Image (cartoon, grey):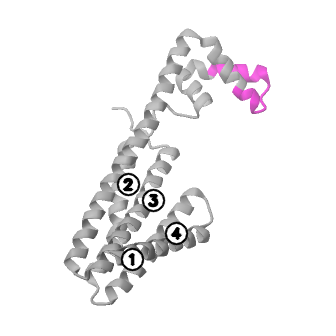
Amino acid sequence: MAKKQEQSLAMRANTLRAGVLGANDGILTVVGVLFSVGAATHDSFTLFIAGLADLLAVAFSMAGGEYASVSSQRDTEAAAVQTESGLLKTDHDGEREAVIADYVARGVKRETAAQIADELLEKQPLNTVVAVKYDLNPSELMNPWMAALASLICASLGGILPLGALTFFPGIWKWIGTIIATIIAVALTGLFSARLGHGFVKTAMIRNIIIGIITMFIHYGIGMLF
């Protein structure tokens, strides 16, 4: 049995990205519903059902969106691989020239680049031309199911934090707890997204916290209107 290949860095990064986005959307949409409905009614059961319904809806919606998006990306990658497979049969010289040009552009002498191209095309022709032209590995195309699952799980987990605070905290503490839980949750998604994108952690966390607070105020105001 062939050894199972590990996910590439790009695949892992895409899965993490889907999870972070799912968590952030799960938090903000659930909080939005809780504050909108909470402004109109203080019935705990009504709030719980509204929040739970929205949590399930956003989790499956995010998962479906990620699956459709990554599937389109995978189809594009697969089409590119298929095209290059055909060109290796019909225009081998052109494919060889593309590989040579790539190494020349990196600073390798043409004679050396030609030797490298010939050796690579002899051993791994399809992998070589696809990597040169598209920076892809034919055996490691994007996985839509992993992205969808990550988004589903993370959106659910993200929304559970504010929903749990509103459900289990008594009296006025339920709203204070929900606000605190939301701030903690969006700060964590900011942290993870910054780590994933090698960005500024503090900036990402502050930005997410501000967005979370604005979201609560806006939805509470909308609920008060009705």
Q: Which mark is residue 151?
A: 2
State whether residue 59 is above or below residue 139: below
Q: Amino acid at mark 4?
A: Asn
> What is the C-alpha distance between the residues marked 3 and 1?
25 Å
Q: Are marks 2 and 3 in contact (CB under 8 Å)?
A: no
- Upstream in sequence: badge 4 or badge 2: 2
Most common SS among magenta residues: helix
Q: Quadrant of the N terminus?
A: top left
Q: Secondary structure at mark 1?
A: helix
Q: Which mark is residue 220?
A: 1
N-term mark: 2 or 1: 2
Q: Position of residue 48 (x, y in %)?
A: 24, 74
> Toward the viewer: 223 or 144?
223
Residue drawn at x 50%, y 18% as measured from the top left: 85
Between the residue at mark 4 and the residue at mark 2, the CA separation in whole angstroms equals 18 Å
Is the Cβ of the residue at disc 2 closer than 8 Å to that at disc 1? no
Q: Position of residue 30 (x, y in %)?
A: 34, 68
